[in-house]
Amino acid sequence: MKEIILTAKFRLSALIALLAICITAQAAIASHVQWSAEIEQTAPDKAILKIHADIEDGWHIYGLSMPSLPDDSADVLPDPTSIEIEAAPGLTVADSTMCSEKPQIHFDDFMSLNLPWLKGKLTLSRELTLAEGTSGAHIRGYVSYMACTDVSCTPPARYEFDLTMGNPDSSAAIDVETDKEAETGTIASSNESTGNSNTQWWTPVETDNESSGEGRSYWAIFLLGFLGGLVALMTPCVWPMIPMTVSFFLKSGKTRRRAIADASLYSGSIIFIFLALGLLITLIFGPGKLNEIATGAVFNVIFFLLLVVFAISFFGAFEIKLPSRWATAVDNRAEQTTGIVSIFFMAFTLVLVSFSCTGPIIGTLLVEAFTDSNLMGPLLGMGGFALGLALPFGLFAFFPSMLKELPRSGSWLNTVKVVLGFVELILSLKFLSVADLAYGWGILDREVFLALWIVLFILLGLYLLGKLRFSHDAASAHTSVGGFFGAVASLAFAVYLIPGLWGAPLKAISAFAPPLYTQDFNLYGGEFKVFNDYDEGMRFAAESHKPVLLDFSGYACVNCRKMEGAVFDTPEVREIIERDYVMITLMVDDKTPLPHPITVEEQGKTVKLRTVGDRWSFLQRHKFGISSQPYYIQLDNNGMPLMAPRAYDENVGDFVKWLENGVSAYKD
């Protein structure tokens, strides 16, 4: 067994390490720098804000200023450490921040620049002055920083503080409280330019969320995972292991019954390992945190780059692998033990060996599963994947004659590997698109996305026809039948995508492509008016005497895109919405900063909302007691539900009936 496993080259990829860094970055950043803040009063009207940092050994943050770059440079410097303090009545804050420690100058080879590092324990300070007649003020703000080692950095983070300077008198206290109420009150009001809002629109209501369809996609998550496991079987890292591993069990067993039992235990161990992985990640960080990270630019850009790197590797440019001692250590453990423990370690070795091929599939699966807000998504996704991967080991153990029917390893496995490279490159654009939409970068509009997909599917078709070769491809004198039909499918799909460049809906890829509103040129007609501000839409509906169709969506929500393409883009649904409803679509992962942070109370805790998406996400949790997307609910002009809400369900007839019943309920 040891020789068999060693022949697999221990292709454990760097994906799991990098993915773990990405997933844990935001959750773990606070442990690398411990912060505290205090006010040191130096005179009745003067004080110093002191913020103390204790930086973990081996880590550093950057100085208060960074060197300037040439005007034509494309490099981006790391974020410097800075203090932001909110304005308060009668408070003047010095412009400069002082640091108790002098930065250590470190030469960065990549950027060819000297960068200032701050390490160990230090204190940042800002001078504060009160205006005449002001006896005190509330000091609120945050420290913005990045924590790094010599080789990696966590995403930019903030340490927030809320302190009191002096003794605010009654009038100042009233001013501060009024300001706080105004800040909190903006959660129930629009911008000043849109006028006053009805606070009843934000009042919590009781809804039948159980009938909303939440969780209906669980089977889809499981099937997606199962299909991912079957695809993983066709990779060069896994396929050769099937006959070798099963033959080992059948030959080493004293009886066929014992061999079958051991092989079944081996398959079960594979399922257990992947389930434990999904459960461990989810329990440590929580589905909500994983969902938050999965919709952020940091995660999506890193995963986009990872898939591109893997695609280049699968094309034969290089091979990603870690030192063989990782798998050797586990394999030695398997040889030193017996019984169930030995079989478990053999299964764990297979997981390690195959991860360079299965990692991208698992990563994509976890991203889809983490868009759910509870534990079931990741568990079902990983369970389905593990079942699809482990099933052949059990089947071939029960029916060993099937091993003779397996095609032998050969050049076809390399073809599968290259095809997977194309698939990874195609899917990588989805992750870049999520970040682009959430932050409004505008670099991957719908037509650019489709143009890239068209080119990639054409190149895939040419590869399957043998017209495009990579360095590690074997010469072939003819095109295989399977390659021919694969090329037909790929090229036909490219032709299908072409009308999308001019605005065709392309419902088959609505879950992946950017929304139609990002299309610069559309020959297929415009979309009906959709409000993206809750209060503005509610006010317009009241003035128009129409009910509201409220849609909680997200840029990273795949099922939201499916609903838009399969349901909202149909003539019957579009006609009802245009005629009878005012539609409000709120993106819960919109990263646009609010003009001013909003402080709210939620479940006994003070929460500060900083982005537009934070605000709409809070609205959904606060008013309707749910946080999953898509989520559709009809409201009257007082913000009260007209019907039970709905979630993901592509049945157009049921959706039309639901809309019609909502109109009838509004008129009654």
Image (cartoon, grey):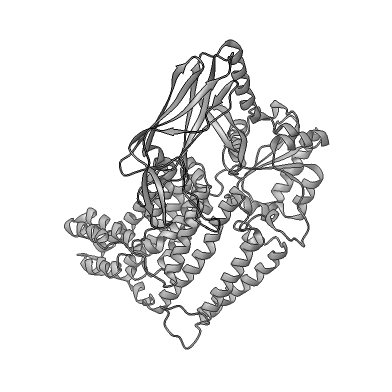
Q: In the rendered image, is residue 237 in sight?
A: yes
In the image, is 354 to the left or to the right of 466?
left
**Viewed as shown, does residue 601 lie left or right of 328?**
right
- The C terminus appears in which quarter of the rendering? top right
Q: Is residue 636 visible?
A: no
Q: Is residue 422 above or below residue 281?
A: below
Residue plotted at (52% across, 60% down): 428
Indicate whether 634 appears above or below 559: above
Which residue is nearer to you in this view: 125 or 607?
125
Tell me where residue 457 sits by quadrant.
bottom right
Left of 548 or right of it: where is 25?
Answer: left
Residue occupying the point 30% across, 57% down: 348
Q: Residue at x 55, y 78 (%)?
A: 462
Report x, y in % for residue 580. 80, 42
Q: Could you tell me which quadrant the N terminus lies in?
A: bottom left
Q: Position of residue 370 (x, y in %)?
A: 49, 47
Task: Give coordinates of residue 328: x percent, y percent.
Answer: 23, 61
The quadrant where residue 535 appears = top right
* 481 in relation to 342, above or below: below
